[in-house]
Amino acid sequence: MFTRVNEFGFLEAPYRKVVHEKHGKDIISKATDEIVYLSADDEQKHYVTHAEVVDDNDRITQERIATRYKGDFWKPKKKKQNM
């Protein structure tokens, strides 16, 4: 996947959407196959992490992962992730 140029001439980067499914007491965070393209401005509104956090089943198994939100880096619990 590669970036694309939007109608205003700005680059948009591709991200996989993350869903959180409740299974009993557990919440399973999983990267979907849905690709969302975000510009840098739009990216500020989402919790974004790198692609290496998913396992072979597209699940996020780590409890805390490096995340970018509103330009800052931190390690929230995985249920905050949405991209």
Image (spheres, helix red, strand yellow):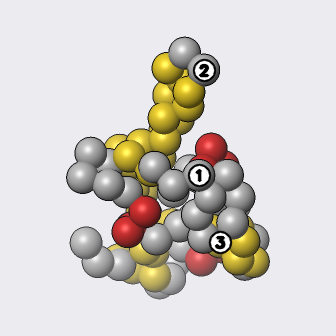
Marks 1/2: CA–CA distance: 15 Å
Location of mark 3 (residue): 68
Q: Which amino acid is tagged 2? A: Lys
What percent of the width, then of the height, locates residue 25?
Answer: 60, 20
Q: Is residue 28 left or right of residue 63?
A: left
Question: Taking 79 as reference, is 52 above or below it?
Answer: below
Circle 1 packing at 10 Å, graded few (<14), some (14-19), many (20+), is few
What percent of the width, then of the height, locates residue 40?
Answer: 59, 77
Secondary element under disc 3, as helix, strand or loop, is strand
Marks 3/2: CA–CA distance: 27 Å
The residue lying at 29 percent from left, 77 percent from top is 2
Location of mark 1 (residue): 63
Q: Earlier in the sequence, mark 1 or mark 2?
A: 2
Secondary element under disc 2, as helix, strand or loop, is loop
The residue lying at 49 percent from left, 20 percent from top is 23
Q: Which amino acid is tagged 1? A: Glu
Question: Taking 74 as reference, is 57 above or below it?
Answer: above
